[in-house]
């Protein structure tokens, strides 16, 4: 099947969840475009943002690695994080390479394109905005928390998130990809700090609303303290609708597998609980609900099962 004949899937998100999903999906005959948040301001990404005034490279780096088709050692090198170094401590080599490529070319998006060639990336990786942005959260008590990494630490209920500058624009390629998509996938990932930073970009929001493609939301498996404490699946959808200002999701994928008690105990320390999948309420929201065995334990950490998720998404597009 030629690339032109392949179904076009656009995936919007960030964080670990997006990378996990892409590792499975790239094995299918699909044309993938990943639209990735660049609002991270913590760790290596935050330091490079501040020092060089570039968009946060961390989530972009993870997505490039997930979609790469290179020797495992090359991917491991790209993802390598330095330790025991006064100047490099905490930096990922991939972040430094993206920063260097941006400095050489003068263009963050072009740097991503060049790294995609080097890593033989299967698909396109596009930043949600082409310049550095700051994620802010208006809390229920009226206070505003500035910075992606500070939002979960505030320990307050989030009312809405927004970017500064508020007129941050996406690339024309991003809008074109959404318009041409056969399937648009939202998530998985942290609701307020990985997914919504993309959807509050005005042109992206409008393109998603106007798209002809079916829109699928992959719901998180666990709640997150400081973001979605005690949220049900329908609460996640409600937050998406409130930010986009109207219902727009056709299908939601939820987990139907019980999480072992021993694993839940580990998450108790993080005040994280399994998301309650209130299917009847989801159906009343006129959503097509797909419940699957979509979890995998990775050294005691709950992840989405990349193989099962890719299989479900491909079956939807077929």
Image: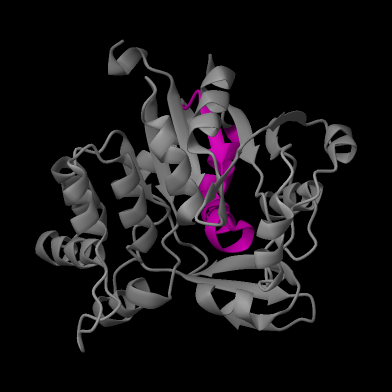
Q: Residue at x 51, y 48 (%)?
A: 203
Asked if residue 209 is among those painted magenta in the image, a careful observer would answer yes
* Range shown magenta: 181-210
Q: Main secondary structure of the magenta part?
A: helix
Place of residue 147 in the rendered image (x, y in percent of width and height, measured from the top left): 52, 77
Snapshot quadrant of residue 156: bottom right
Q: Residue at x 47, y 27 (%)?
A: 181
Quadrant housing the N terminus: top left
Q: Is residue 167 left or right of residue 53?
A: right
Residue extending furthest toward the left: 104
Residue 206 in sight here: yes
Residue extending furthest toward the front: 262
Residue nearer the viewer, 35 or 171 = 35
Place of residue 303 in the rendered image (x, y in percent of width and height, measured from the top left): 55, 49
Q: How many numbered marks are there?
A: 0
Q: Residue at x 25, y 65 (%)?
A: 95
Q: What scheme was used to colour the molecule?
A: one colour
Up/down of 182 relative to 60, above or below: above
Snapshot quadrant of residue 243: bottom right
Q: Is residue 272 left or right of residue 283?
A: left
Q: Is residue 280 left or right of residue 235?
A: right
Up/down of 43 relative to 254, above or below: below
Residue 14 in sight here: no
Asked if residue 202 is among those painted magenta in the image, a careful observer would answer yes
Place of residue 161 in the rendered image (x, y in percent of width and height, measured from the top left): 63, 66
Snapshot quadrant of residue 80: bottom left
Place of residue 223 in the rendered image (x, y in percent of width and height, measured from the top left): 70, 59
């Amino acid at each position: 099947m030629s690339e032109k004949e392949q179904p076009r899937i656009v995936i919007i998100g960030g964080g670990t969840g997006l990378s996990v999903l892409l590792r499975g999906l790239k094995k299918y005959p699909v044309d993938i475009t990943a639209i990735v948040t660049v609002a991270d301001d913590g760790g290596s990404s935050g330091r490079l943002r501040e020092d060089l005034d570039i968009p946060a490279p961390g989530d972009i780096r993870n997505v490039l690695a997930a979609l790469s088709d290179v020797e495992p050692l090359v991917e491991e090198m790209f993802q390598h994080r330095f330790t025991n170094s006064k100047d490099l401590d905490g930096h990922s080599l991939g972040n430094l390479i993206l920063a260097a490529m941006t400095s050489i070319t003068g263009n963050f998006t072009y740097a991503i394109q060049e790294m995609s060639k080097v890593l033989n990336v299967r698909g396109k990786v596009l930043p949600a905005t082409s310049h550095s942005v700051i994620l802010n959260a208006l809390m229920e008590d009226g206070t505003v928390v500035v910075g992606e990494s500070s939002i979960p630490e505030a320990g307050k209920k989030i009312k809405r998130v927004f970017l500064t500058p508020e007129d941050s624009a996406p690339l024309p390629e991003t809008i074109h990809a959404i318009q041409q998509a056969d399937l648009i996938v939202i998530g998985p990932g942290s609701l307020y700090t990985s997914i919504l930073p993309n959807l509050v970009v005005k042109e992206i929001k409008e393109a998603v609303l106007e798209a002809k493609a079916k829109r699928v939301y992959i719901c998180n498996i666990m709640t997150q303290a400081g973001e979605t404490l005690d949220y049900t699946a329908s609460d996640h959808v409600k937050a998406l609708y409130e930010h986009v200002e109207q219902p727009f999701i056709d299908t939601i994928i939820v987990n139907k597998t019980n999480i072992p008690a021993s694993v839940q105990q580990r998450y108790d320390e993080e005040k994280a609980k399994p998301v309650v999948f209130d299917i009847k309420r989801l159906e009343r929201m006129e959503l097509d609900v797909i419940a699957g065995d979509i979890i995998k334990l990775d050294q005691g950490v709950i992840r989405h099962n990349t193989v099962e998720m890719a299989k479900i998404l491909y079956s939807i597009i077929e």
